[in-house]
Each structure stands twice: as C-alpha cells, then as structure tokens.
Amino acid sequence: QRQMCIRDRILTEKGKVIFAETKGEHLKNDNSREKIDLGAMWSGHAGNQYRYFMVFEKDADLPKGAVSMSKFVEIVAAL
C-alpha cells in the first residue's frame, strides 16, 4: 500500500482545501509521477472542495500533472 506525504495544507477564503506537496528539482522522477496520480485520484474521490498539487520550483521538465511554484500561486489565487 502506497502512502503519500502531504507537506502543506491551505484553506482558501472560499473553503477549498489544498494539499500541496513541494519537491526539489532533483525529485522529478517516476516516484513523483506515481504520487501525482495518487493525489489526483484522491482529490477526485474527496470531493470538489479538495485539491492536490505537486509543486516544483521551476517550469522546466515538469512531470505530467505537476505545476511550477509560479503556476501554483496563480491557481491558489483563483480558488
């Protein structure tokens, strides 16, 4: 059974709960891709008020489903 390490929890003014797992650039690998898939599955089952993001500092070579820190800030501001 796989476990996920959630680093940060954010509650927006509109009541959305965001779980963000921040990663160093050296962790752009298959393990991160598996966690992204697991996080997407979790947020899909958890309900509309919950979101999961894997966040890396830079835009370059992001695993599918991950976001950069600048994009994450934009997304959170819109929620």
Image (spheres, rainbow, N blue to C red):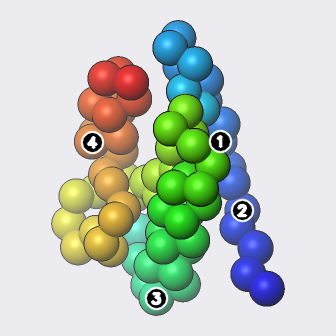
- Whether residue 14 can be seen here: yes
Q: Amino acid at mark 3?
A: Asp
* Residue 50, quarter of the rendered image: top right
Pointer 1 local density, CA inside 10 Å: few below 14, some 14–19, many at least 20? few
Q: Please, what secondary structure does the residue beneath circle 1 have?
A: strand
Measured Cα–Cα span from mark 4 to mark 1:
16 Å
Q: Please, what secondary structure does the residue beneath circle 4 have?
A: helix
Q: Amino acid at mark 2?
A: Cys
Q: Amino acid at mark 4?
A: Lys
Q: Amino acid at mark 1?
A: Asp
Pointer 3 local density, CA inside 10 Å: few below 14, some 14–19, many at least 20? few
Q: Which residue is mark 4?
A: 71
Please tell me which residue is depicted at 50% across the width and 14% down the height of the picture. Answer: 14
- Which residue occupies the foreground of this view, 25 or 9? 9
Q: Which residue is mark 2?
A: 5
Relative horizontal placement of residue 35, taking residue 66 as reference (left or right): right
Please tell me which residue is depicted at 44% across the width and 84% down the height of the picture. Answer: 29
The mark that comes first in sequence, 4 or 1, is 1
- Whether residue 32 can be seen here: no
In the rendered view, would you say 48 is above or below 64?
Answer: above
* Residue 21, quarter of the rendered image: bottom right
Total marks shown come to 4
Residue 46 in the image, given as x and y percentages of width and height: 63, 49
Pointer 4 local density, CA inside 10 Å: few below 14, some 14–19, many at least 20? some
Q: Which residue is mark 1?
A: 8
Q: Mark 1 and mark 3 in contact (Cβ < 8 Å)?
A: no
Measured Cα–Cα span from mark 3 to mark 2:
16 Å
Q: Please, what secondary structure does the residue beneath circle 3 have?
A: helix
